[in-house]
Amino acid sequence: MRGDGRKAMVPRLSPTFADLNLSEKTLQALERAGFEHPTPIQAQAIPPALGGRDVIGAAATGTGKTAAFLLPIIERLGGGAPAPKDRPAAAHGKPGPRALVLAPTRELAVQIAGELDRFGRGRHVRGALVIGGVGMGAQSAALRDHEVIVATPGRLVDHLQQGTARLDGLEVLVLDEADRMLDMGFAPQLKRILARVPKVRQTLLFSATMAGEVAEFARAHLRDPVRVEVARSGT
Ligand code: ADP
Ligand code: MG
């Protein structure tokens, strides 16, 4: 619809998802989900993330940060047809996941994995949960052959220590609710994980605030990030 002359006359006060350079498949998934317009954080974070840039996104709870990082991951990884069951993620030459989303709690990880399922259906993007409270075995298998891992830091470190997680092929790292992860004392786990991921990667960091420890963390681990900030109200 980009060439639609009539639409082009309308001032671009509120962008559509189609304005964000998303694929037809993703636009269809958004339509199925009933998402009509991107939220401000989505409108600002998705284009640089699609372009491969590191992004720091600061926005309050409920502003749509999950889709802001999941949609660029799906576009990057989800090229054509869904992966055949017998084709490992190692198709890109390295073992293990191509994208890793770290979240502070199991509940949040479950929620993110659900959103990935919803938006990534029919794409070459299989997501797996790596969280505490459930067995390690199935997770170890998933860590070998799923493209996207949604994990809590503690359980992922358990896998790294056991030798059941390899992150050498990681292309995208997401730190969701980074402020909460640091508040909850996950800095040592994050440090161990960051020591095991490739230096050349894309990092997306989302947080409700960018104060103190998070800012320092972002300075240490992101590369020339695009900063996107959305005020709590009045947007
Ligand atoms: P945050 O991570 O910023 O707290 P979420 O990503 O969990 O926010 O989104 C909050 C709620 O808003 C979820 O129920 C989500 O499905 C919904 N949502 C997100 N983006 C949109 C959108 N563009 N249009 C409609 N609903 C949306
Ligand atoms: Mg969130």
Image (tube, rainbow, N blue to C red):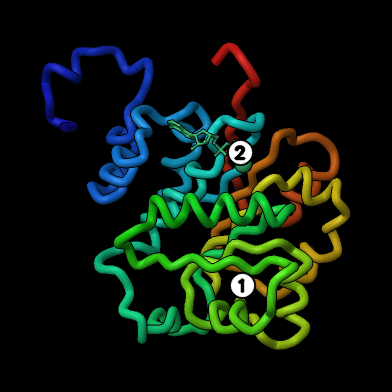
User: Are there few (<14), some (14-19), or many (20+) residues within 10 Å of tag 1?
Assistant: some
Q: Which residue is mark 1?
A: 198
Q: Is residue 82 left or right of 101 when viewed as pictured?
A: left
Residue at 32 percent of width and 28 percent of height: 16
Secondary structure type for disc 1: loop
**Residue 51 visible, this angle:** no
Judging by the rendered image, the residue that carries numbered circle 2 is: 57
Specify which label sits upstream in the sequence, 2 or 1: 2
- The amino acid beneath tag 1 is Pro
Q: Identify the residue at image location x=78%, y=45%.
A: 180
State the SS at label 2.
strand
40 over 57 or under it: above or below? above
Query: Foreground mark, 2 or 1?
Result: 2
Picture quadrant where residue 152 is located: bottom right
Q: Nearer the viewer, residue 135 or 174?
A: 135
Toward which corner of the image does residue 229 lie, by quadrant?
A: top right
Distance of mark 2 from mark 1, alpha carbons?
22 Å
